[in-house]
Image (cartoon, rainbow, N blue to C red):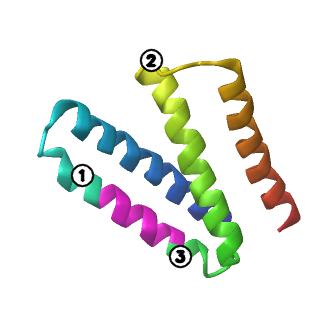
Amino acid sequence: MAWFILLIAGLLEVVGVVLLNEITRTKKKSLVALLAIAFICSFSTLKVAMNDIPMGTAYAIWSGIGTSGGTLVGMLLYNESKNVKRIFFIGLIILSIIGLKLIS
């Protein structure tokens, strides 16, 4: 269950990053409350996951999900670079997340 909670924490981190981008692009101050809620929920679920998963592993996976998820959303929704090297290294992050899960 802790791994599922950690996945949710990482996905909430992606939501927060997308909201941060939307605030930057649109200047809509109304999104700030949603941003705060997303990050509070992300940190809270990360804390819950760390009750069963070691801090270093949990943080690495949480930040990896946030990094790769934010980059993938950027490529899909915001027409960011889809350079093959960029996709390769995002794949390495995802493989590292899977590797950490397998050895933990």
Kindly identify the amino acid type of the residue bearing the numbered disc 3: Val
- Where is residue 10 drawn, in percent x and y? 54, 54
Q: Which mark is residue 79?
A: 2
Kindly identify the amino acid type of the residue bearing the numbered disc 2: Asn
Tell me what residue is drawn at x 70 percent, y 19 percent. Answer: 84
**Front position among marks 2 and 1:** 2
Q: Secondary structure at mark 2?
A: loop
In the rendered structure, which disc, 3 or 1, sits on the residue that comes first in sequence? 1
Above or below, comparing residue 53 to residue 6 in the picture: below
Q: Secondary structure at mark 3?
A: helix
Q: Quadrant of the C terminus?
A: bottom right
Q: Which mark is residue 48?
A: 3
Q: Which mark is residue 87?
A: none
Classify 10 Å Cα crowding around label 1: few (below 14), some (14-19), many (20 and above). Answer: some
The magenta region covers 37-46
Taking depth in this image into account, of 5 and 70 the one nearest to the observer is: 70
